[in-house]
Amino acid sequence: MPDASLGFDEEGIEKVKQRRIEQIQSGGFFKIPYYCDYKWIDSYNAERYVKLINTYSSTQLLEKFKRENYLNEIREAILEYSGIVEMPQQVCLYMVHK
């Protein structure tokens, strides 16, 4: 879901929410959904972040030698700066009932 902290405007965010609510109600089977969003920040140290990146398909497609160099460069860059990568996360819940 777009978020104002990522540079999206509030009006655009509201339009996305309204469009989803309209989609849920379009068949006439459900009442107005309850909406709630949950936000948090995941913090990764260099090792944990490298393990995450290593699960990506694009990383796995690299030849072993190139992949190891790529992951080492990421690890070194993280350690050179703060040692932590913070990634904002958001889950949007639309709970509906008939």
Image (tube, helix red, strand yellow):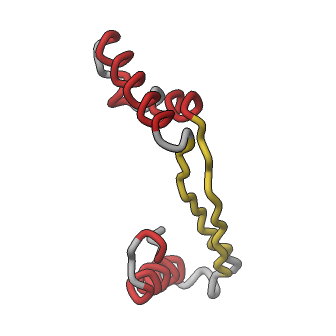
Q: Residue at x 36, y 27 (%)?
A: 59
Residue 58, x across and y down, in percent: 33, 30
Q: Could you say which is closer to the camera, residue 77 or residue 25? A: 77
Q: Which residue is drawn at 66% across and 67% down?
A: 38
User: Which quadrant of the view contains residue 44?
Assistant: top right
User: Which quadrant of the view contains residue 67?
Assistant: top left
Q: Could you say which is closer to the camera, residue 55 or residue 40? A: 40
Q: Could you say which is closer to the camera, residue 54 or residue 21? A: 54
Q: Residue at x 53, y 35 (%)?
A: 49
Give the side of residue 9 with respect to residue 20, left or right.
left
The total number of labels drawn is 0
Q: Residue at x 29, y 20 (%)?
A: 62
Name the outermost residue toward the top: 65
Name the outermost residue toward the right: 97
Q: Quadrant of the C terminus?
A: bottom right
User: Which quadrant of the view contains residue 54?
Assistant: top left
Give the side of residue 48 with respect to residue 98, left or right.
left
Residue 78, x across and y down, in percent: 47, 37
Residue 3, x across and y down, in percent: 48, 73
Q: Is residue 49 above or below residue 39?
A: above
Q: Is residue 56 above or below residue 23?
A: above
Residue 75, x across and y down, in percent: 46, 29
